[in-house]
Image (spheres, helix red, strand yellow):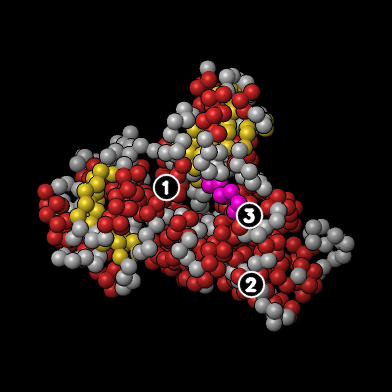
Amino acid sequence: MNHHCSSALVVDDEPLVRNLTIRALAREGFHCDSAKDGREAAKLAAKGNYDVVVTDLKMPNQNGHALAVELMSMPSPPSVVVLTGVTEPRLAKDLISRGIDDIIYKPIDYSVLSMKVRAIAERSAAARALTTKTTQADCVEPNVAAPASSVASDSGSSGCVAPITQQDVADNIKARKSVVPICDTSLSVYRMSGSEQMDTKALTDAISKNARLTEEIISIAQSPFYNQSGIAIADLPRAVVQLGQKRVGRLALAATAQAALLSDEPSPLNLGLIWARGVASGLAIELMIEQGGHESISDGLILCAAMQDAARVALARLYPERYQEMIDECLESKRSLHEMEMIVFGMDSQTISSLSMNAFGINKSEIDVLVHLHDSDESLSRLPQKLQTRIKLVRLAGYVAQAVIGIWEPWVEIQIPRRGAADELELWSIDSVIEKTRENSEGINFKPAVTSKLGTQETTQRGLDYCSAASDSYDFLEPVVASLRPEMANCFNPTNADGDVLLNFLGGQSADAQKMVDAATNANICVAIRREDAEFYQALPNKIELPLSYGAMHKKLGDLNSDAS
């Protein structure tokens, strides 16, 4: 993705942190200057015209708080991001009230830091551009590149962008509990079903408090999948016995989530697909817990798996017009919705989880999992081992769910689990988890009757051969590619192929990729790699760097024909 060159001032008295921050921002296209304390930074800021200042809080000579106050008093202040290892709510509130853009707590995930700083810079640039244009009702020209500027405020007062702070979002979610697809009854039933001391009568009494849930549980118990004998089940107690105590909790979550998501309240998101993905994730993680022997750390994991998209659903219901604009921008620019959330809100949907999920009865241990789902491997490695495993289980369950459903929307960010992810979790067969998840989904009215808004390529004069060099128990990239190029065929020797070839080298860095490209005579080879390995593979003429949006991959694979012609 191309960004205009922005300038940043990095302030930290620790050389290692300073250099790591500069390196991360440079990868996002920033030109960086540095200072070792607040006094030096203030002098540089007075002379330079920085887009963003990233500063540590505790420093000699002049601390980060004093520097931030001085910067915000400038006639045209830069955006300010504070890094700190001090968790002090009053200090954070004071800094936010003075107008700084974000506070990032140590230890720092530098990939997340750079993405946030880039999003802040783009929002600030868009806001500055608006103030220099005419004050007509439509403040934004049709071809403005910065997507945040094309996203209008949901207040309807004007087309100018109104900032949405983290506190705004948290307050709005707390004021409207219905925006999160879960109800108190189903959450209570889910928690009760996991207790060894809970009896059928108590569980039945809890379910009966919700007439719609009662009706749904009886209906599921009567379905051929769960009642192969065909014996009539007319009441709730028999339905609970038929389904089993633990399964009832999971089904209660699925049923009420479906009712909430598929209500008449409009949403720019495909809620049917989100519901299906949540159900499949819950089914998958139940199988993974059993297969890998993770029962001792399984508390709340089914809920976490099912709620992976809950924060995004909440945001879209609070700001429907904003989300529709974001989706339109994704279709146009091929960005992912995750990236757009960072640009428009200055935070991703998982950050919203940490702000708001405690308002809906979600335990801290469950929030911890949801908040860290998108952490980098480096950041994840600093967490307690038990939490790492819980996060990896939920994350892999999401990948399994996506493979089972087989539908990707254009703005979905394509992420592929690392090689050996299943082995690390002691799962002896991820293939069987996928097949069993697909089979079990048939018992829950699991019919996501939706298709991607991006169809397959209209014309493909050449076929596509697919070859995976990433040895793993299951290739998660293959179904994504097959959905985009239905004529795809597996091949084992890409150098002898005749036509388009996609070579999967997501497993790591290997010189074999370049050798295969050089040896191919009639094949037009494109290599799929991880973005972090881009420097190693920079000599490859044609490559796809993951993660990227489904829409971007759609375009890249479609372009293979034109590249070869």
Residue sitting nearer the eye, 305 or 23:
23
Residue 330 lies left or right of residue 27; in this view the side is: right
Residue sitting nearer the eye, 126 or 530:
530
Residue 417 lies left or right of residue 239; in this view the side is: left
Residue in the picture at 70% in, 79% down: 196
The residue labelled by disc 1 is 339
Q: Is residue 415 magenta?
A: yes
Where in the figure is residue 129, as x and y percent of width and height?
Answer: 24, 42
Q: Is residue 107 above or below residue 550?
A: below
Where in the figure is residue 74, as x and y percent of width and height?
Answer: 13, 55
Residue in the picture at 34% in, 49% down: 24
Amino acid on which disc 1 is placed: Glu
* Displayed quadrant of residue 517: top right
Secondary structure at numbered mark 2: helix
How far apart are labels 2 and 1 at the CA level? 35 Å
Depth check, mark 3 against mark 1: the one in front is: 3
Amino acid on which disc 3 is placed: Ala
How far apart are labels 3 and 2 at the CA level? 18 Å
Q: Quadrant of the N terminus?
A: top left
Q: Can you see residue 261?
A: no
The residue labelled by disc 3 is 422
Q: Is residue 380 above or below residue 475?
A: below
The residue labelled by disc 2 is 296
The range drawn in magenta is 414-421
How far apart are labels 3 and 1 at the CA level? 27 Å
Residue in the picture at 18% in, 53% down: 77
Q: Is residue 334 magenta?
A: no
Where in the figure is residue 406, as x and y percent of width and height?
Answer: 64, 44
Q: Can you see residue 39?
A: yes
